Amino acid sequence: MARIESVQSAFYQIPLDTVLSDSTHGTIPHFELVTARLRDADGVEGIGYTYAVNSGAAAFHALIAGYLAPAIMGEDADRIEQLWQRMWWKLHYGGRGGHATSAIAAVDIALWDLKARRAKLPLWRLLGGFDPHVPCYAGGIDLDFSIEDLLKQADGFQAAGFRAMKMKVGRPHLRQDVARVERMRAHLGEDFPLMVDANMRWTVDEAVRACRALAPCNLVWIEEPTIPDDVEGHVRIVREGGAPIATGENLHTLYEFRAMMAAGGVTYPEPDVTNCGGITIFRKIAALAEAHNLPLTSHGAHDLTVHLLAAAPNRSYLEVHGFPINRYVAEPLRIENGLAVAPERPGHGIAFDWAGLEQHRIT
């Protein structure tokens, strides 16, 4: 039995080298990171993390330290489903998603990391294994970039080995978005996989118009065209806009994904393992997508999610995000000819530079 002997959480605010931007979060000068470190009676450690854009992560840290750590202390770390349910019901009354599922996710990820390390297996193999070479794209956070900077970034992505990329849309006027996407399409060539992300900017009617206006640009998908709460609106966008739709980074429970898929409001389900409840729930979302014959993509946390998509037969693209966690890990994600390679190191294989992170620690 792998009994849990310690649970530690920490909260960091990490500045970005380049201020990023999108249509709803505005300018993004930093991101917030919360880690969870579990240790069992044999001294084996499991590490998990979650994050927020600009604000909110202090609450994740408080929930882990004040509620989740006491709830799992002394328990059998191998009984992850039972521990997930315990954490879920511990926080349920205070909120069934958002802050609660982000906090649960960090601990759940640490539990799976601990389990894989004890088994001396990389996480993607422990989860069943499919293919460690995962198609990926570079996720630009670049709404306010000039067109020259946008194209320069695209060249840098290709030089780094990416063979697909995403850009932001959601400017004040649709014609501005269309002009920028047309320039990017001409720059990349007709067959280069290109996605766009509106970050929930549009109303349903605006999204339908945008989908139709962008149709000649041959996009892989249009992401988060409107608010995640409007399931019926997403159905209208899929039906009337005629473009593939990705959504899910702001869906925080299995039940929200079920509702969106069952209604036909999504083409590419897009869970974020750090806010949907962790690996336990991500796996269930992946299976639900497979049952609906839908290709799975992902949001953020690429160094974790590469394992999950490497174990999913219905995976499409892994998002490789712009937040600079790479400088604080020993071995960043490896990209080879447009494919992210899931590592063979035990667990998820992320080894944080704790000393480097310490300068950004809040509590």
Image (spheres, rainbow, N blue to C red):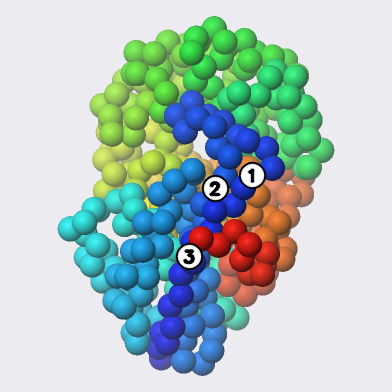
Nearer to me, 181 or 282: 181
- Residue at left offset 49%, top offset 44%: 53
Total numbered labels: 3
State the residue position of label 3.
363
* Cα gap from disc 1 to disc 3, whole angstroms: 20 Å
Residue that lies at the very extreme toward the right in this rendered image? 159
Residue that lies at the very extreme toward the top in this rendered image? 175
Helix, strand or loop at disc 2?
Answer: strand
- In this rendering, does residue 229 appear at all? yes
- Residue at left offset 36%, top offset 56%: 59
Sequence order check, earlier mark of 1 and 2: 1
* Cα gap from disc 2 to disc 3, whole angstroms: 15 Å
Helix, strand or loop at disc 3?
Answer: loop
State the residue position of label 2.
31
Residue 151, x across and y down, in percent: 74, 23
Q: Is residue 325 left or right of residue 314?
A: right
Q: Nearer the viewer, mark 1 or mark 3?
A: 3
Residue 251, x across and y down, in percent: 35, 43
Query: Which image quadrant is residue 121 in?
Result: bottom right
